[in-house]
Amino acid sequence: MSITAVPLQPVKRSYLVYLWIGIALALVAAVALARQGDDPLARNARARGVMVTASGLQYKVIAPGKPNAAKPTDADVALVNYEGKLLNGTTFDKSQQPTPMPVTGVVPGFSEALKLMPKGSKYRFWLKSSLGYGDKATGPIPANSTLVFDVELLDFLPQSVVQQMQAQAQMSRGAPGGVPGGAPGQPQP
């Protein structure tokens, strides 16, 4: 039994070029599809200028503030301007004027973020749900939401100083027990 070989016709060079272009486009499309499935925070972490802390808090310095300026601690009250948004861009909270916030009186991620900021700085923070409100819906914030904050740290004072200032203000306004000439707990005219 003999087998006769049939010669193959040569393939045009342009067909090979189209074949390789098609393979390259398929690879690019596969990579693009794989990235679409990424978690938004994972994508954000790769963005230029975004830093990630050990807890997963992501932040970007918008304005650095004063060089070598002090940063708030857990014992401080920060004076801030802020705007809080969901990932879809919906604003859920915004300060109308500079707002005092005890550093330990806010969600864990916001507290951590404040302690990174020197006076006069402006940062953007991304808080994964475990650093925000977790699996609880809170007002306009759905459960398991990633939160985005733009925060400007104007100043901060120790909480003890703020409490002392508040007590003095109450006394000067005539709060019960602090007004000369009035008995403690007695209504004033």
Image: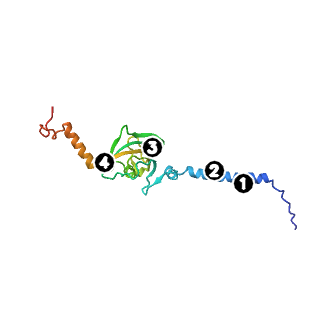
Question: Of callouts 4 and 3, which one flags the residue occurring earlier in the amino acid sequence?
Answer: 3
Which numbered disc, 4 or 1, marks the residue closer to the eye? 4
Residue that badge 1 annotates: 20
Residue in the foreground of this view, choosing between 84 and 161? 161
Marks 1 and 2 in Cβ contact (< 8 Å) = no
Residue type beneath disc 4: Leu
CA gap, disc 4 to disc 3? 29 Å
**Which of the 4 image quarters holds residue 186?**
top left
Residue that badge 3 annotates: 86
As helix, strand or loop, the secondary structure at mark 4 comes to strand
Q: Is residue 131 visible?
A: yes
Q: Residue furthest top?
A: 189
Question: Of callouts 2 and 3, which one flags the residue occurring earlier in the amino acid sequence?
Answer: 2
Residue type beneath disc 1: Trp
Residue that badge 2 annotates: 29
Residue in the foreground of this view, choosing between 178 and 52? 178
Residue in the foreground of this view, choosing between 146 and 175? 175
CA gap, disc 4 to disc 2? 53 Å
The correct choice, above or below, for 74 with respect to 89 in the image is below
As helix, strand or loop, the secondary structure at mark 3 comes to strand
- The 10 Å Cα crowd at callout 4, few under 14, some 14 to 19, many 20 or more, is some
As helix, strand or loop, the secondary structure at mark 1 comes to helix
As helix, strand or loop, the secondary structure at mark 2 comes to helix
Marks 4 and 1 in Cβ contact (< 8 Å) = no
Residue 154 position in % (x across, y down): 37, 44
Residue that badge 4 annotates: 157
